[in-house]
Amino acid sequence: MASLPSYQDAVTTDWARLVVPYIDPRDFAALCRVNRHFWEIFAPRIWGRLPSTTSDRVTDSDSEYDLDWLVGSVLGQLSWTRPETASLVRVLDLRSIRGTYSLSMSNSFNARLRNAIKYLPNLNCVLIDGHVELDPSEFLPEAGQQIQLLSMANCPLSLPARFISSHRGLVYLDLSRVPSSVRPLFQIGALPELRILKLQGKEVDDAMVKSLASHFVTRLWSLDFTDNKLTDQALDHVGAHCLWSTDLRSDANFDVEGKLEFGSASPTCGTPIRIIESEWSGSFTHPNRHLADAPSYDLHDTMPQEYMYKRLDGRSRIKCDSADAVYRGLRGEDPYLLPSNFQSSQGLTHLNLSAVHLQLNVAFSSIKGSRRGMAEDGKTSRLLFRMDPTTLAFIQPQGVEIASFCRNSNPYPGD
């Protein structure tokens, strides 16, 4: 959660910030001209994302000249923009920009984009999904290590190995259905800050999963292997390297809840689990049976709350690993996804295996072996796995093939 405000912040209310959600974004430009205070409030909302969502050209999906407008009216004017204003740009989102392309225009567009980025010192998020004419290796070298988010799904181009090694600051990388090899991702020293990796439709096999898991270990907290040719061994590699080893279960609540006892694992049956009841837990008669866990506090206020191990109470919001959520978090706009979530990781918490052929008994063995619990979210129809004290991981069941399902192999006999 976000840190508590100071007393002065709590008792001082800026009415202008309170009414921002109720103002038409098309009026932000006029409000910036009221005074300096209004400019500090509304200018970042106009310039934080380029092109701005307040532009009529972005919202008009039928426009045939979006690309011409972007190059001529936006990128071409950055050299005339005040440095103070250009420094507000944090996100370059070209996903909604479309137009007619040619080879000569593509080369010119990459060159003009590279020149424009020189005037954006704080740019750290680039989203170019689906663009066939854009080459990040051509227009991003000027940005260096300041880029933290790069989403280029469905871009039919191949990235050179040196591109990955030169962008060590990336925390979010989406290479879904990009024809380039994934081997540069696990070269020595590559992507030390990466937390979210999406590799949909990349023909990743078990050997590559093993190399990725061995390289990133617990640095990643989100991994997307949708539509890849994986077998059961891939889950074994992920479970062996990418899951945080800390067990949240303890005997502290044995009197109220009982406890779980794990037996020795076997290749056929997995890890057996036995429930041991206390004097009260079996009949649910303990006087404290309805009390929730007390909040955790650091006596000297030196430990960030995200590093305190505590059990979830069902009210915590699940961290979102989408590109839109991540760039809002990097900009400090999401109180539930703080920048600190990208500075460290407690192991893998989000794993997407849609359209992957897995055996049911192996999947259940991996879930039980993680020793983090299991829950089901009725609203999203997703299977949720409790992976660490701050978030939940999910495997979307849509499109997942379940093989070898029979009564003899069911890990929960009697169901």
Image (cartoon, helix red, strand yellow):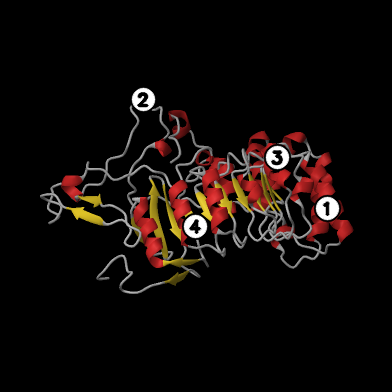
Residue 17 placement (x, y as % from top left): 56, 42
Q: Are marks 2 and 4 in contact (CB under 8 Å)?
A: no
Q: Are marks 4 and 1 in contact (CB under 8 Å)?
A: no
Q: Is residue 242 visible?
A: no
Residue 238 placement (x, y as % from top left): 47, 52
Residue occupying the point 85% across, 53% down: 107
**Looking at the image, residue 129 lies above or below residue 242:** below
Q: Earlier in the sequence, mark 4 or mark 1?
A: 1
Rounded to the nearest angstrom, the CA distance separating label 1 from label 3 is 22 Å
Element carrying mark 2: loop
Please name the amino acid that badge 4 sits on. Answer: Ala
Residue 344 placement (x, y as % from top left): 50, 38
Please name the amino acid that badge 2 sits on. Answer: His
Q: Give the label on residue 234, or none.
A: 4
Q: Can you say which quadrant of the picture contains the N terminus?
A: top left
Rounded to the nearest angstrom, the CA distance separating label 4 from label 1 is 40 Å
Q: Earlier in the sequence, mark 4 or mark 3?
A: 3
Rounded to the nearest angstrom, the CA distance separating label 3 from label 2 is 40 Å
Residue 288 lies left or right of residue 6; in this view the side is: left
Which of discs 4 and 3 lies nearer the camera? The answer is: 4
Q: Which residue lies most toward the front here?
A: 267
Q: Is residue 54 visible?
A: yes
Q: Which residue is mark 2?
A: 300
Near-viewer residue (183 or 83)? 183
Q: Are marks 1 and 2 in contact (CB under 8 Å)?
A: no
Please name the amino acid that badge 3 sits on. Answer: Ser
Please name the amino acid that badge 1 sits on. Answer: Phe
Q: Which residue is mark 1?
A: 109
Element carrying mark 1: helix
Q: Which residue is mark 3?
A: 166
